[in-house]
Amino acid sequence: MRAVAFVAALLTAVAPGTDGEAAPAPRSGGLSLAAELAPRVRTLTRRVATYHYTTRTKMGLPSEGAVALDDPRVEEYLRERSALYWDPRFEPAPGHPIWGLYVATDPVSSRVFGGFGEDWALVRVTLPRGLRFLEVRTADAARRPEDRLPAAVREELAAAGCEAAYAADLVIDRGSLACREVALRTLLDLEVDALLYDFKAVDYPACDGSRNGAFLLLRAEALELPAARAYTAPPPADGPAAEEGRAIGELFARARAAGSTQRPIWPAPDDQVAPSAATERWMRETLFACGGYAEDRLDGRPAAAPADPAAAAELRALAAERAGDDAAAAAAWEEVLRHDPDRVEALYGLAWLRATSPAPGVRDPERAVEAAEWLVELTHYMQRRSTVGFDWPRHLKLRASWTVAVAYLAAGRWDRGVAYATQAVETAAAQHRAEGTPLSARAVERGGRILALARARKPYEAGGPGRDFESFGDALAAGTTGY
């Protein structure tokens, strides 16, 4: 209660948007944390476009029909969302991100947080030149000992009741009231408008080696909110919005060519769009970490490509699946699992190929069952232990049920196949009753197809998951890794 009272008093005095002059920002409790983080404060030297997915209803917009790109309710929503970071109604929840306005630095990366259906919108938020942000990314997005806060700072934090070891944990995680108090004091000391943290990115040829991350925006007053745009439908046929809409569509096409499963929210033949030279220029001008600006780099140096052999093998597997080379895809998925036995996407891809591929030497029902059973175990654990919102744990569990059912059919274990196919259909039907979308309807239909085969004691004959379950697989992937 003491910390909650402190935060409330603190925000009453210095919260952004209060009338009149703000009281002097309290110092960070005598800790050396602010001095340690001060060299990580940077300033944008140009405007940067960022992207945020949310629903129309959350912005107060109608759930269907045409909506103006610059509807004033969008700006109001963004102001309220950014103020959540300073909300004194705080409850500790280790592993959960703090409330606030999160924006990714390209529309494809941010798509991982978006759902499906006409109610969803892509919101563009422009960061102005001069915006001050605190850099809390690490050299390769991995938690290495050398990336921890210095021992002296960690000891001071511990003495204050805060056990954070990394800067990102302190300012983004809802770990404890003590850490929250220190974080707020420190950020006010540093006078920053945003946080830049590690976040998944798609590797684009035009932005080779970039580590763009994502921003948590702290102060609405520092943003160009009147310039915010909400895309709820295909962009208009002409004008500046049409040009940007085409560029975004091409960016999704580039991302899909690089292995992403993401699509824009509006219908678009993004798989058939040939990315243009104009998009190359647009990317370098508008995407953070793509144009080579000094403030985009870690410690003033170009970011090193992450040394992740599992990720490299995963990209090879996805490329082989798109090319229809089941043997190469299966070999690459096996390589992924040698490096990371718990990688959900690899277990899913391998199980489907080993269970359904017609390619000589690829089909291996027992290996399919082994991978699928472990997938079920992992997704059951993830659903029970999930610290992420939205419906992704249920999507994981549904996809795992489909996969293990198909694996059992390939191995001739008909009763087990029927049991898991029935479970998958029941789960899909429940989601369809709740969502009522064409996507959820297709999920029910395809689950029913597997169940019919199981009851007829017939194996499922198909290729990899990307070729037969493309639409629903894309939707599920958007709720898991997304890449």
Image: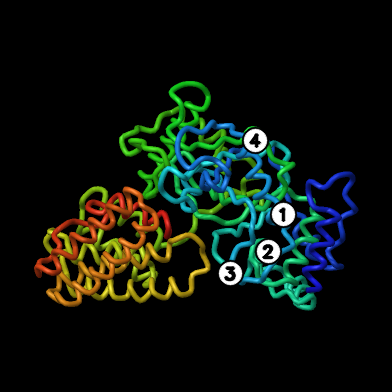
Mark 4 nearby-residue class (10 Å; few <14, some 14–19, many ≥20): some
Are circles 2 and 4 on residues that touch, CB within 8 Å? no
Q: Give the alpha-carbon distance from disc 2 to disc 4, as whole Å.
A: 26 Å
**Dot 3 amino acid type:** Gly
Q: Nearer the viewer, mark 4 or mark 1?
A: 4
Q: Position of residue 326 (x, y in %)?
A: 20, 57
Disc 1 designates what residue? 40
Horizontal side of residue 51 vs 323, given as left or right:
right
Which residue corresponds to mark 2? Answer: 167
Q: Residues within 10 Å of mark 1 (few under 14, many from 20)?
A: some
Name the amino acid, label 4. Arg
Q: Whole-Å distance between the Cαs marked 2 and 3?
A: 14 Å
Q: In the image, residue 235 lies at what x, y percent?
A: 46, 30
The kind of residue on which mark 1 rests is Arg
Q: Indicate which disc residue 258 carries.
A: none
2 and 1 marks in contact (CB < 8 Å): yes
Q: Which residue is mark 4?
A: 47
Between circles 2 and 1, the one closer to the viewer is 2
Dots 3, 4 in contact, CB < 8 A? no
As measured in the structure, the alpha-carbon distance from the residue carrying label 4 to the one carrying label 1 is 20 Å
Which mark is nearer the camera, 2 or 3? 3
- What residue sits right under mark 3 in the picture? 95
